[in-house]
Every structure is written in structure tokens, then in C-alpha cells.
């Protein structure tokens, strides 16, 4: 498998993958594309008929002194103009419908695919550079598809037409033109090896700009706290400069095509001038043919010149396409097994059996961890930071798959269920509650979108969030802003509780959920937590003993292993890590 | 129009590049016109006179002229690309710098995706205008001017007839420009919305997974995506109908010339050659008309995007350094809140808060969720401005001093630990990029982060992913503490900094912090008794007001709220002490 981000680095001019995939997306639009192609041909014909009508008007009308022919031509000419207008309109409109539908389908497919990729995928990539693929790379393809593709087609058509006329006029002279073809081939190869890499670099560079933007906007509060603005600005300047360099370099390569075409044109004309001039002097051809031929050679290179200009766009969108499809082809690593079953209503029994897990090979974060949570039980995980507590929560949610052993829910390996059917019966409250921009209500509804307003309010009231919500100017409709910055951390946490409560899960996971809440609120929350825990299986990660005291079982984790387990009063009585932590906390308190 | 002028001002910085591009344009046009003349000479003086040597000479001359033309065209294309990229780079740098300097108040309301779109998609549309637009404009003006002069010299009446459509095409051009503007504005807006949804979704992917909300998210994205699709099609349709219409209307001029001129030729008032030549000139004007159509489109877009960009560049940060602000020397660290009221989103968050923290004091801040604790400490480094009242540091109002000097002496550990995608070393040295390795390690040791960092595969050079996902919550918090300590700040602010570390680590950090607090003014927001017990003064907030103030013992006696807030912990502490000593069975009251 190719390394991520290396798409297109092989320096090919034509990306089979990108083109094939794009063609498969175009399959549904075949008749429309045929229609557009037909229109292009008609437009070319109508455009050519304009000069022809002029010729008739002059030769048969004015020269023959026949006003009627002139008038006829003067009427026919606007008709061709109108025809060209209407057809161009139809063609452009149709093409934009095709390309916009195609591109928005690609965007949606990418978004949907991103929804299936695992936490592991996201932990290795910057959000900003992923966004760049969905937005910026598609924008590049848009430019090519909605503008370049048609032009490319009609230019190619024109090229063929002129070649045909030239052969009809004088085959031997026409053949001479083709002596420039080996040069063209060489030049193309020279260009190709460089251009693709250059455009690849531009796409990467803009993705880096995007990533830097995203991160620095998201982290602007830290930057200001540390008076780091100047240095960040300088650093962004460097990323921005790299993008500038890459783009200008690609632009220079692109611009170099024009002189190449000019020189090819000059060589062809020179060849005809010498050979044709010779033959004309010998009387083997007429001056008229020579003049006509020179005109055609000139015009022959016009579309080539045009083509070379669209070529850049083609290259850029080829690379963009590869990046898009690279993302779409990123294998989903946590997938439902064939024959995975739909989890019915779960009882909520959870069992970890010899579970080993490593984020990086050779560095186990969990080492043969085994425990059982009976339905309705609350199990608390305690232990030093980095002992692997959150990892256990992630494995239960199946955000990652185990490296060894099994996570068993209601007697079945969690991998035997359709993942979403299990996850739908779980809810989680994280230490750093993530809220989405939108109303308070929407954030609570996140747990169960179909819930009624009354249910939302009941959930908020149950966790004691109703008071501050109603205090805000629009109550439940108050906008919380991005990541919930409008609210204090504790308030965000309460909303996260309401969200979990509304989800009415069978299995509840709380990862340091009360760390940011003041003690008094927490005490009030205890009642809510008691409601929340009733009849549910719960896995609670906490440092505060006040939170874990009610647990049916406490597991003490150290360096990825369970070193102690039991009830609070049992653990406190035996010498060990728990007793040490507990006495320390008492000291701290 | 003002927007276009401002964009042009960005271009004007690189007037020499633009001048070179125009010079290349002149060269390539000159060479292009030379070639037909050479061909004519080749026929007339070479072929017709049977001069073979002249024929070969002409072939060489044509190649030479083409090389000049090609070279000049390369230069023009390259320089055009360069100037547009220069403008794009400058706009992006300016936007970024502005984002960095806008205050918390602005960023609280702004959407990351929105801000990103302006620095990418909008910059790009302005860039296209400066590159192709400006140079094409000169090109067209020259071409049209020269052609018009020639046409007028040939026949004035025919010229007027030929150009009778100009008002109509002109009107069409302006009309399409006006119509494209709102349509393109809608496209940029929808792009920004899409970016926002995407950004939030990717940042919060774990919550989306955990609550199985993928389908709804896809639907939400799909709705916006569809809106963007229709907006784009709508604009393309507008452009597709009006652009070619302009060409068609302009073509009517040819008909008029032909019909009227033809009759004059037949009447013997005009030579056929003149009519043919005239028509040829008119045809050379058709290309500029097509390009004008494009330019109208491009200009309209640049105006929309320019407005969106300048809207941000013109946004005044509510927190602004006054001109002539005082440069702070090393602070003693006296912090005074003088009758401070702070309003956020039209709600008073702090009301008439007054207190003084003497240099070296530890101030504990206590209060329920939403009581204004974080707002209070956010005012000290002037992340927000007070509504009324003043905050004075060493006697200076924070609004009268330079921000950088102020913030550099304040070390802050925020509740929401944000780490950047960089190495741990770079994250710790975030506030002091020049710090030595020893200093970084010392800070990490003080924050009890050294051991876990050393245990990592690349030690201090371990990359932490975006938002530091590879570290646990407690580890991130310790890196953030090390980051603040490295600043060697005069004022230290800890916003619940040890909430997610285990008791053992907390004790260790606590001890380290105690040493570090020595000689610094420290503000500690904490839920825990331990953090506030050693404070020189404790401020208890309730709904934005100070309801109690004093030392631990004093508040225990006097403040019911204080006792209520700590009560549970007091019991627990007593029990724990008992149970550890006596191994008795405690009854945990929850």
C-alpha cells in the first residue's frame, strides 16, 4: 500500500486511478455527457459557418451586386449567433450540473467515509489537512470540470478538423508537420516527470497551510496566553512561503509550455517555408496552397496552445483527484465482520478477557487485562495517569480493536456484533466534554435526536443543568458557540451528562466526568448520577474517591495491568496501591 | 469598488513585477505581429523572386521571432502567476496575523471553519483576479484602443455602426456582474458552512462515534453540500446565459457593417477591400468582449471575496493596545481588582468585584460551576476587557500597558489543555522558544512530567498528535504546567490545573507548585480543599459576586457557603486519615 500522502509522487502525467475512478462516478451521466459533446460539435460547426456566410455575402452578394443575397446572409448570420448563444448556454449549464453533482457526491462520499474511519486514523492526522482534501482539492477539480474539460474537448475537436483539412490540401506538406512530433513527445516526457511532482507539492503545501490555520485558530487562546503571536505569525509565514514557492514553481513549469508550443509552431512553419518555398519556386505547388497551408499550420497550433494552458488545470485536478480517492480508499479498520449480528436489547454484561492492546507495536498499553461487570453493576477504574484507564473505555466503545484477547458483551465477542448496534446502547461522558456549535437543546439532543422538548428538559433538570440554562437569555435555544466556549467547563460537563442521560444507554462510560465540576455541584450531581447508574452497567474512571466510593467493584490499574480489585472497604484494608492513593488523597484534602 | 481598490493596493506593492509582466506582454504582441509580416516578405521577396537563400533566411527569422515571442509569453505567464501568488501570500499572512491578535471575545463567536475559508477559498478568488484580471485588463484596453483608432481612420460611420451594440453589451456585462455577486457570496458562505461542519465533526469525531450519530452528521453535511451544489449551479447558469449572450449581441455589429457596408460597396461608395479589412478588425474585438465577460465574473467574485477578507482585517479587536502604551518592566506582582464588572453576552458575569493580591500571595478562588471563576482570571492577562472598573497590576491599569510584556510575565494553565501537533519539547517551550534543553527538562521535572516523557520512544522529541490525543488527560495537564513554568512568570494562574491527575501525582505536583509559587503571585481555581488550604486569601464567588473572603480557618468559621462547598471533603479527609491510621472500616458518606 502506498504511503499516505504519497499519491501521485510517481511522476506520471496521467493518473489511471484518478481517471478510472472519476469515470466510474460519471457513469450515471452518460447521456448528458453525450448531449454536451453533441452541443460542442454543433457549436463548432455554427461558429465555422459564420465566416462561410460572410464569404457568400461578399462573393455572391456584394461582388455579384445582388442585394437579396446580401440581405439573406445578413438574416442568416444573426441566426447562427443566436444558435451559438443558446447552445453555449445549454452546454455550460448542463456541464455545470454534471460537474457540481459529481463533486458534491465526492464531497459527501468523503465525509461519509470519514465517519467510518477509526479513532486511530484521526490520531495520526491533522484535521486541517483532512479538511483540505474535502474542500480545497474538490475546488481544484471543480475548476477543471466546469471550465477546462469542455474547452479541452472542443480544442481537441478543432485540432482534428484542421489536420483533416491540411491532409486534403497537400498530403506531403501535411506529413512534414509530423516531424515535430518526436520533439513534442520528448518535451512532454520532460514536462510530465516534473509537472506531476510540482502539482503534488502544491496540493500538499496548501494542505499544510490549512492545517496550520486550523490548529492556530483553534489554539489561539494558548498563543495569546503565552504572548506567542509573533512567533506563530513568523511560523505561518514560513508555511505560507512554502506554498508560495511550490505554486510559483508549478506555475513556472506550466508557463514553460507556451514557449515550447511557440517554438514547435516556428519549426513547423520554418520547415514549410523552406520545403514549400523550394517546391513553389520549382513550380511543384502554387503560392495559393502555400499561403493557405501556412495559415492552417498557424491555426493548428492555436488549440495546442490552448490545450497546454488547460493542461495545468488538468494536472492539478489529477493530483487533487488522487488525493480525494486516496482518502476514499483509506481502508476502514474497524469494520463489521461478515455475519456480524444486530445486538438486540442488551442486558449489559461486560467482560474483558486477557485483553492486550498496543497503540504502537511492541508497546503494550494494556497487558492481559481481565475483569467482568455484571449487568447493572458499576465498576470504577483507578490508577495513576497513563495506566491505561481511558484505553479500556475506548476498547469497550470499540473505538479501537483489541490487539489480543477479547472484549465480551452479553457473552459474545464485541466484534461479532454490528458495531453501531452495540454503541447505540452505550453513552459516554468524557473529561473534556465536546460540544458542537448550535443551541443547548441540540447538544442535549445529540444523545437521542428524536427526543421531545419535555424529555430534553427533564434530562437537564435531572443533572441540575436546568438552572443555568434557564438563566441564559434564550434558555434551551441559547447558542453555545464552537466547542461550547460560551459556557464554563463545568456547565459543558453538565450538558454532557444530560446528553448521556437522554441517550438512555444500557452501558454508561464516564471518563473523569466530574473532574471539572465543583464539589457542591458534584454533590448535587451525585443524585443524578445515582439515577443515571440505576439499572445500567457503568464503567467509571475517576480520581476522586467521593465518586468511586459507591462502585460495586474497584479495579486498580498500574502500567496496563490490574493490580488490585475489590470493594472500597476491602481495598482500603489491604496494603497496596489503592491504600496509598487513598491516604494520599486524604492528605491532599 | 473600494474593495477592488484595496485589492489593487496589495498588487501595487509589486508594481515592478506587474510592469515587467506588461513589458513582456508588449514584447510578445510585437513578435506576434512581426511573424505575418515575415511571411509576407517570404512570399513576395522569396518565393515570387525565386530567391532560395532568402527563403532559408526568412525561415530562420521566423524561428528567431518565435523564440522571442515564446520567451516573452513565458515571462508574462510566470510573472502573472508570481504576482497573484504574492498577493495571496500577503493576504494570508495578514489574515493569520489578525487572527492571532483578535481577542478571546472575537474568537468566542467566530467559527474556525469560517475563518479558514476566508484565508483559503476567498484569498484564492482574489488571487485569480489580481493575476489574470489586472494584466488582461491592460491587454484589452491597449488592444481595443489600437483597433478603435484604426477603425475610425478607415470609416467613422461604419465604426459607429459596428459598435452600436456596445451599450447593450456593456449593460449586459454590468448586469451579470451585479447578479453574480450575491450568487458568489452565497457560494462562499456555503463553503464556509461546510468547512465549519467538517471541522467540528473531525475535531469531535469521538463523540460522534460514541453516540452513533454518523448518519445524522452525514445528513447535516449533505444538506449544506446540496446547498453549495445548487448555489454553484445557479451561478454557473447565470454566467452561462449572459456570457455567450454578450458575444452574440456584439456579433450583431458584424451584420450591420456587412449589410450597410455591402450596400455602399454595391453603390460604389466603398471598396470591397476596405469592407473586408473592416470586418477583420471588428472580429479582433470579439475576443476582448469574451474576455470582458470573464473579467466581469472574476471581478465580481474578487469583490465578494475581498469584502469577506477585509471584513475580518477591519474587525477591531475589542482588546486593543493603546498607542503609547507603557512597556512593563519586571513585575512585583501586585494585582488589584477595583470594582470590576464584566459583561459577557449581555449578561453580567462579574459584578463589582474588588480585592487586592499582594506580591507573592496565593489567592484561592472558589465557587460553583458558572459563578465566574474563569472569567475572573481571564481578565488578568487582559483576554477580555472589563465593562466597568479596572484591573491594576503593580498600580498600572492593564489597558495602559503593552500586552506582550504583560502576558509574558503571566504563566497560565487553562482548564482546556490545548497542545499543538509538535514535539513535547516544542510544546513545553511554546512560550519561550529559545529555552535550553536543561531549562525544558527542569520545567518538566517540576511539573512531574519528566518521568513519563523519558519513558516515551522519542523522549522529548515525541510528536504529540493534534490536540495531543496520544497523551492521557493527566499527562497533557502536566505538559501544560511545564509550559507555564518555563516562562518563569511573576504571576501564575492555575485554572483547576490538577483536576485530572491521580492523587499521587497531584501530591507531587502540589509540592512542586508550592516551591514555584514562592515569590510569585498565584491564582488558583480549584474544587479541592487541598489547593485552597494554603492560600493567603480565598475568594468565594457566587453568581459573579464575592460573597466571602479570607483565610481558610476564618472562612470555615464565617462562611456557610464555604463550609458547604468543602464540607464533603472535610468529612472525607477526616475519615481517610482515620481509616489509614486505624485500618478501620469507614462509612463513606456520599
Image (cartoon, rainbow, N blue to C red):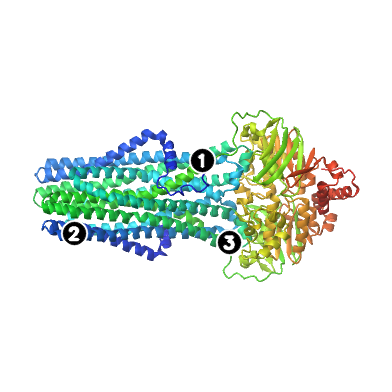
Marks 1 and 3 on same chain: yes
Pointer 2 local density, CA inside 10 Å: few below 14, some 14–19, many at least 20: many
Between discs 1 and 3, the one toward the N terminus: 3
- Closer to the camera: disc 1 or disc 3? 1
Q: Secondary structure at mark 3?
A: helix
Q: Position of residue B328 (x, y in %)?
A: 64, 70
Q: Position of residue A365 (x, y in %)?
A: 69, 46
The residue lying at 89 percent from left, 46 percent from top is: B583
Camera-side residue of A436 and A11: A11
Task: Please give the chain letter of the residue carrying mark 3.
Answer: A
Q: Disc 1 and disc 2: Cα gap in Å?
A: 58 Å
Q: Check the image and report above or below for A413 versus A271.
A: above
- Closer to the camera: disc 2 or disc 3? 2
Q: Which mark is residue A295?
A: none
Pointer 3 local density, CA inside 10 Å: few below 14, some 14–19, many at least 20: many
Residue bearing mark 3:
A229
Q: Disc 2 and disc 3: Cα gap in Å?
A: 66 Å
Residue bearing mark 1:
A329
Camera-side residue of A469 and A266: A266
Task: Please give the chain letter of the residue carrying mark 1.
Answer: A
Residue bearing mark 2:
B56
The residue lying at 33 percent from left, 42 percent from top is: A153
Residue A138 appears anywhere in the view? no
Camera-side residue of A345 and A25: A25
Task: Please give the chain letter of the residue carrying mark 2.
Answer: B
Q: Secondary structure at mark 1?
A: helix
Image quadrant in which you'd find residue B445: bottom right
Pointer 1 local density, CA inside 10 Å: few below 14, some 14–19, many at least 20: few
Q: Check the image and report above or below for B429 versus A463.
A: below
The quarter of the rendered structure image containing the C terminus of chain B is top right
For the residues bearing labels 1 and 3, Cβ distance under 8 angstroms: no
Amino acid at each position: 500500500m502506498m504511503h499516505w500522502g504519497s499519491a501521485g509522487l510517481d511522476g506520471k502525467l496521467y493518473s489511471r486511478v484518478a481517471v478510472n475512478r472519476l469515470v466510474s462516478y460519471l457513469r450515471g451521466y452518460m447521456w448528458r455527457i453525450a448531449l454536451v459533446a453533441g452541443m460542442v460539435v454543433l457549436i463548432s460547426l455554427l461558429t465555422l459557418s459564420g465566416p462561410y456566410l460572410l464569404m457568400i455575402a461578399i462573393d455572391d452578394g456584394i461582388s455579384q451586386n445582388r442585394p437579396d443575397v446580401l440581405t439573406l446572409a445578413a438574416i442568416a448570420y444573426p441566426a447562427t449567433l443566436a444558435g451559438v448563444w443558446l447552445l453555449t448556454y445549454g452546454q455550460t449549464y448542463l456541464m455545470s450540473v454534471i460537474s457540481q453533482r459529481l463533486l458534491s457526491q465526492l464531497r459527501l462520499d468523503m465525509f461519509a467515509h470519514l465517519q467510518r474511519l477509526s479513532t486511530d486514523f484521526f490520531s495520526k492526522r491533522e484535521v486541517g489537512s483532512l479538511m483540505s482534501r474535502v474542500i480545497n482539492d474538490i475546488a481544484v477539480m471543480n475548476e477543471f470540470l466546469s471550465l477546462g474539460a469542455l474547452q479541452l474537448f472542443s480544442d481537441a475537436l478543432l485540432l482534428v478538423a484542421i489536420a483533416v483539412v491540411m491532409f486534403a490540401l497537400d498530403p506531403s506538406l501535411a506529413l512534414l508537420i509530423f516531424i515535430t512530433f518526436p520533439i513534442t513527445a520528448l518535451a512532454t516526457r520532460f514536462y510530465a516527470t516534473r509537472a506531476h511532482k510540482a502539482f503534488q507539492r502544491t496540493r500538499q503545501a496548501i494542505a499544510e497551510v490549512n492545517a496550520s490555520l486550523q490548529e492556530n485558530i483553534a489554539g489561539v487562546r494558548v498563543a495569546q496566553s503565552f504572548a506567542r503571536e509573533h512567533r506563530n505569525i513568523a511560523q505561518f509565514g514560513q508555511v505560507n512561503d512554502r506554498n508560495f514557492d511550490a505554486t510559483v514553481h508549478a506555475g513556472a513549469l506550466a508557463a514553460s509550455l507556451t514557449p515550447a508550443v511557440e517554438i514547435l509552431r516556428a519549426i513547423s512553419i520554418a520547415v514549410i517555408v523552406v520545403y514549400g518555398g523550394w517546391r513553389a519556386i520549382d513550380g511543384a505547388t502554387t503560392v495559393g496552397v502555400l499561403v493557405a497551408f501556412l495559415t492552417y499550420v498557424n491555426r493548428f497550433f492555436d488549440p495546442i496552445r490552448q490545450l497546454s494552458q488547460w493542461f495545468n488545470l488538468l494536472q492539478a485536478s489529477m493530483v487533487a483527484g488522487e488525493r480525494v480517492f486516496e482518502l476514499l480508499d483509506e481502508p476502514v479498520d474497524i469494520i463489521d465482520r461478515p455475519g456480524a449480528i444486530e445486538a438486540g436489547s442488551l442486558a449489559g454484561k461486560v467482560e474483558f478477557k486477557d485483553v492486550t492492546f498496543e497503540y504502537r507495536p511492541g508497546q503494550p498499553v494494556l497487558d492481559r487485562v481481565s475483569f467482568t461487570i455484571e449487568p447493572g453493576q458499576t465498576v470504577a477504574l483507578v490508577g495513576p495517569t497513563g495506566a491505561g484507564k481511558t484505553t479500556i473505555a475506548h476498547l469497550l466503545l470499540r473505538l479501537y480493536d483489541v490487539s489480543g484477547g477479547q472484549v465480551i458483551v452479553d457473552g459474545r465477542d464485541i466484534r461479532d456484533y454490528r458495531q453501531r448496534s452495540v454503541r447505540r446502547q452505550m453513552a459516554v461522558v468524557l473529561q473534556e466534554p465536546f460540544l458542537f456549535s448550535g443551541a443547548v437543546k441540540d447538544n442535549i439532543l445529540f444523545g437521542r435526536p428524536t427526543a421531545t422538548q419535555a424529555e430534553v428538559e427533564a434530562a437537564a433538570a435531572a443533572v441540575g443543568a436546568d438552572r443555568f440554562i434557564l438563566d441564559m437569555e434564550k434558555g434551551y435555544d441559547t447558542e453555545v458557540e464552537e466547542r461550547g466556549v460560551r459556557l464554563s467547563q463545568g456547565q459543558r460537563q453538565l450538558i454532557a451528562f444530560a446528553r448521556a442521560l437522554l441517550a438512555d444507554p444500557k452501558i454508561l462510560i464516564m471518563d473523569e466526568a466530574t473532574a471539572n465540576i465543583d464539589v457542591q455541584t458534584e454533590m448535587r450531581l451525585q443524585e443524578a448520577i445515582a439515577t443515571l447508574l440505576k439499572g445500567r452497567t457503568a464503567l467509571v474512571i475517576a480520581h476522586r474517591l467521593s465518586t468511586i466510593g459507591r462502585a460495586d467493584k474497584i479495579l486498580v490499574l498500574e502500567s496496563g495491568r490490574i493490580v488490585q480489585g475489590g470493594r472500597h472497604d476491602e481495598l482500603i484494608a489491604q496494603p497496596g496501591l489503592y491504600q496509598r492513593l487513598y491516604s494520599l488523597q486524604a492528605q491532599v484534602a | 469598488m473600494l474593495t477592488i481598490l484595496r485589492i489593487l493596493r496589495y498588487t501595487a506593492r509589486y508594481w515592478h513585477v506587474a510592469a515587467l509582466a506588461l513589458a513582456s506582454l508588449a514584447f510578445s504582441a510585437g513578435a506576434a505581429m512581426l511573424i505575418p509580416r515575415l511571411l509576407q516578405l517570404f512570399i513576395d521577396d522569396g518565393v515570387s523572386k525565386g530567391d532560395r537563400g532568402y527563403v532559408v533566411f526568412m525561415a530562420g527569422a521566423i524561428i528567431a521571432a518565435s523564440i522571442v515571442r515564446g520567451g516573452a509569453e513565458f515571462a508574462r505567464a510566470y510573472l502573472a502567476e508570481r504576482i497573484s501568488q504574492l498577493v495571496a501570500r500577503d493576504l494570508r499572512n495578514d489574515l493569520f496575523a489578525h487572527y492571532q491578535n483578535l481577542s478571546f471575545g472575537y474568537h468566542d463567536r467566530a467559527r474556525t471553519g469560517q475563518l479558514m475559508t476566508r484565508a483559503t477559498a476567498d484569498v484564492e478568488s482574489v488571487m485569480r483576479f489580481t493575476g489574470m484580471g489586472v494584466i488582461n485588463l491592460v491587454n484589452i484596453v491597449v488592444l481595443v484602443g489600437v483597433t478603435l483608432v484604426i477603425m475610425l481612420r478607415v470609416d467613422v460611420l461604419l465604426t459607429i455602426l459596428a459598435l452600436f451594440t456596445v451599450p447593450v453589451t456593456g449593460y449586459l456585462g454590468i448586469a451579470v456582474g451585479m447578479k453574480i455577486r450575491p450568487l458568489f457570496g452565497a457560494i462562499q458562505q456555503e463553503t464556509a458552512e461546510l468547512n465549519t461542519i467538517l471541522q467540528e465533526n473531525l475535531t469531535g469525531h469521538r463523540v460522534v462515534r460514541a453516540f452513533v450519530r454518523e448518519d445524522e452528521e452525514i445528513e447535516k453535511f449533505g444538506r449544506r453540500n446540496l446547498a453549495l451544489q445548487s448555489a454553484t449551479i445557479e451561478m454557473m447558469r447565470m454566467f452561462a446565459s449572459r456570457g455567450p449572450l454578450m458575444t452574440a449581441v456584439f456579433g450583431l455589429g458584424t451584420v450591420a457593417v456587412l449589410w450597410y457596408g455591402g450596400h455602399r460597396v454595391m453603390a460604389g461608395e466603398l471598396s470591397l477591400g476596405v469592407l473586408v479589412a473592416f470586418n477583420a478588425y471588428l472580429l479582433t474585438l470579439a475576443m476582448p468582449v469574451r474576455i470582458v465577460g470573464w473579467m466581469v465574473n472574476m471581478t465580481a467574485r474578487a469583490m465578494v471575496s475581498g469584502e469577506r477578507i477585509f471584513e475580518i482585517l477591519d474587525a477591531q479587536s475589542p482588546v486593543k493596545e493603546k498607542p503609547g502604551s507603557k512597556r512593563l518592566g519586571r513585575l512585583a506582582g501586585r494585582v488589584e481588582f477595583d470594582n470590576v464588572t464584566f459583561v459577557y453576552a449581555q449578561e453580567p458575569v462579574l459584578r463589582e468585584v474588588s480585592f487586592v493580591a499582594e506580591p507573592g500571595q496565593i489567592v484561592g478562588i472558589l465557587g460553583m460551576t458558572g459563578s465566574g471563576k474563569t472569567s475572573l482570571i481571564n481578565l488578568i492577562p487582559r483576554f477580555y476587557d472589563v465593562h466597568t472598573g479596572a484591573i491594576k497590576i503593580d498600580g498600572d491599569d492593564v489597558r495602559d500597558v503593552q500586552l506582550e510584556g504583560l502576558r509574558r510575565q503571566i504563566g497560565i494553565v487553562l482548564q482546556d489543555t490545548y497542545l499543538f501537533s509538535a514535539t513535547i519539547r516544542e510544546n513545553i517551550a511554546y512560550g519561550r522558544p529559545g529555552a535550553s534543553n536543561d531549562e525544558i527538562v527542569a520545567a518538566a521535572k517540576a511539573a512531574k512530567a519528566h518521568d513519563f516523557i523519558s519513558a516515551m520512544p522519542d523522549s522529548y522529541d515525541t510528536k504529540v498528535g493534534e490536540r495531543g490525543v496520544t497523551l492521557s488527560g493527566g499527562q497533557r495537564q502536566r505538559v501544560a504546567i511545564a509550559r507555564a513554568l518555563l516562562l518563569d512568570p511573576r504571576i501564575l494562574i492555575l485554572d483547576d490545573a490538577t483536576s485530572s491527575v491521580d492523587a499521587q501525582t497531584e501530591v507531587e505536583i502540589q509540592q512542586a507548585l508550592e516551591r514555584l509559587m514562592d515569590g510569585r503571585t498565584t491564582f488558583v481555581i480549584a474544587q479541592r480543599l487541598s489547593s485552597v488550604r494554603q492560600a493567603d486569601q480565598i475568594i468565594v464567588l457566587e453568581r459573579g459576586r464575592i460573597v466571602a473572603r479570607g483565610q481558610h480557618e476564618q472562612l470555615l468559621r464565617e462562611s456557610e457557603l464555604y463550609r458547604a462547598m468543602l464540607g464533603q471533603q472535610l468529612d472525607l479527609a477526616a475519615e481517610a486519615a482515620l481509616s489509614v491510621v486505624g485500618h478501620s472500616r469507614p462509612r463513606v458518606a456520599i
